[in-house]
Image (spheres, rainbow, N blue to C red):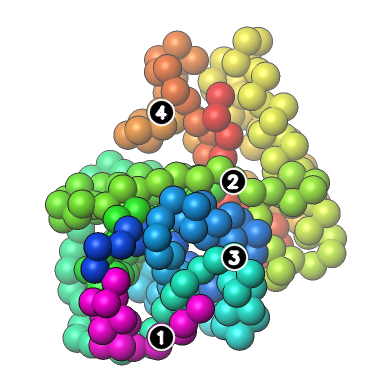
Amino acid sequence: MKVFDNVKDLKNKLILKTGYSIGFVPTMGALHEGHLSLVRNSVEGNDITIVSIFVNPKQFNDSEDLKKYPRNTEKDIELLKNTGCDIVFTPSENEIYPDEDEEYFAFGYLEEVMEGKFRPGHFNGVAQVVSCLFRIIKPNNAYFGLKDFQQLAIVKKVTEMLDFSINIIACPIIREEDGLAMSSRNVLLSEEERRSAAFISKILLQARDFCNIKSVAETKKWVIDILNKIPHLSVEYFEIVDDTELKKVEAWYDRENIIGCIAVKAGNIRLIDNIAF
């Protein structure tokens, strides 16, 4: 496994790999089993797998969140050695953004709801870094986890807008034994916050059974009310939407494929999750 920290050396290496299929897993480090599952999927489906580790400042609308985001690149590289990963790309901010990136992406409704509503500018930052990395690496396939469901929709839209010939492959959410969706932010939780956070997935699972007995509005209210009563938890949003345009659904029969997306603060740590109805 080779590690590169600059674009020039990485591109020189990739020139020698022309004709091979490239799988790409972009990450912000602090790797966990969720990330590693993406890497293994890429290894299985491609000749070469590249993982990037880059904490993208442009997708943080909260400077404090950026400061406390967990970082441990040495540990991340050690974890990747056992996955079959071929190349790790660990660029500095100057490598990704040698000039001020003022590219603006208009996603319309996709960026106005849920994460877009509560994190203004976040998805433009995501689009900027993804487009930069895609141009550098030119992968055939790129792998993203379904936990960041709205981000996945944005990445697909970026790929379409910029006419990239890249397959965006969605991979299942990987969960802890108690059901909590794996996240780099989980390590920032206190013991009490961590115990409370496990209820997020448990309540979502219960809510999935409500489509036969409760309305969409009743289900949303029940989830929010229950989670807000659990110590340390505060629901930022819970929306029940279609899985393509993320439009809110008013009744279970409005759409064939419906997903519930949630953001919850456990103490000061913001966690997201979702469940298919």
Cα–Cα span, label 1 and label 3: 17 Å
Dot 1 surroundings within 10 Å: few (below 14), some, or many (20 or more)? some
Q: Residue under label 3, please give it.
A: 83
Of callouts 2 and 1, which one flags the residue occurring earlier in the amino acid sequence?
A: 1
Give the residue type that dot 3 points to. Thr
Magenta-highlighted residues = 1-17
Report, in whole angstroms, how far the alpha carbon at label 3 lies from the one at label 2.
Answer: 18 Å
**Mark 3 Cα-neighbour bin, 10 Å: few <14, some 14–19, many ≥20:** some
Q: Is residue 35 above or below residue 275?
A: below
4 vs 2, front mark:
2
- Secondary structure of the residue carrying tag 1 is strand
Q: Amino acid at mark 2?
A: Ile
Question: Of tags 1 and 3, which is closer to the observer?
Answer: 3
Secondary structure beneath dot 2 equals loop
Q: Is residue 178 magenta?
A: no
Image coords of residue 30 (percent x, y): 60, 72
* Distance between the alpha carbons at the discs numbered 4 and 2: 18 Å
**Disc 1: which residue:** 4
Task: Tell me which residue sits at (32%, 58%) in the image.
Answer: 21
Mark-to-mark CA distance, 3 and 4:
34 Å
- Most foreground residue, 42 or 71: 42
Q: CA distance from mark 2 to mark 1?
A: 29 Å
Which residue lies under the disc numbered 4?
Answer: 242
First along the sequence among labels 4 and 1: 1
Residue 35 in the image: x percent, y percent? 57, 60
Front label number (2 vs 1) = 1
Q: Quadrant of residue 133?
A: bottom left
